[in-house]
Amino acid sequence: KGFSPRYLLPFLAATFGLWIAASYRWKVVLQGEGVRVPFWTLFRYRLMVFSISYLTPVARLGGEPFKVMLLKSQHVKSSKSFASIVLDNFIGMGFDAIIGGLLLIVIFFTSSLLPLQIRATLLAAGVLVLVAVALMYFVLIRRKGVFSDVLDVAGIITKLGGRKFFLIVKRRVAAAELYIRGTLMREPKKV
């Protein structure tokens, strides 16, 4: 009821700006892995994946397997594609989490109207979010096989661990983990 056409242009401009920034971030991540894909190609891929994500239950992650297929048309190995997607999402969601954590801490210091117990909870949540992001970053850098370990557990639980398809997936995930660690360690400024 409150919609007005005058809000449409700023909304579209902000959305376009976010897509541009996200496409550029993905390009930088791919460059960190030694892959060159034109910016406007990545922008187009991001729009296609965004539309697919609307059809899936997980809005920000639903179209990610499609990104691997799209990058394959650019002659990018699936393990590098997977690594770039994980890093891109980690950076994007990590940045969102950092902003959210900082905002919770700011609310603690600036909101004297809230009861102290609620303010303390907000402070604890903000600090916890910042610590969680830092831990995730260091785990991805220092620890080999984070995703491989999860696959091992899944293989044991489902009893598929020895099947050929499962072993192929695990090998590709392990290769992607090497790219992720390499990019995080070699290109920390880009990250």
Image (tube, rainbow, N blue to C red):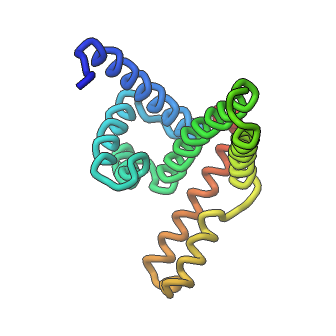
Q: Which residue does the image show at 39% across and 34% down from the upper left? A: 42
Q: Quadrant of the N terminus?
A: top left
Q: Residue at x 72, y 24 (%)?
A: 110
Q: Residue at x 49, y 33 (%)?
A: 27
Residue at the limit of the structure toward the top, as seen here: 6
* Displayed quadrant of residue 91: top right
Q: Image quarter for residue 48?
A: top left
Which residue corresponds to the image point at 49% horizontal and 36% vertical from the top-left? 26
Rendered location of residue 157, percent (x, y): 54, 84
In the displayed structure image, the side of residue 73 where residue 31 appears, left or right: right
In-front residue for pair 102/58: 102
Instruction: Tell me residue 124's x, y (percent).
Output: 75, 44
- When asked about the image quadrant of residue 174, the answer is bottom right
For the C terminus, the image quarter is top right
Q: Is residue 76 above or below residue 112?
A: below
Q: Is residue 173 visible?
A: yes
Residue 173: image location, x then y, percent: 54, 63
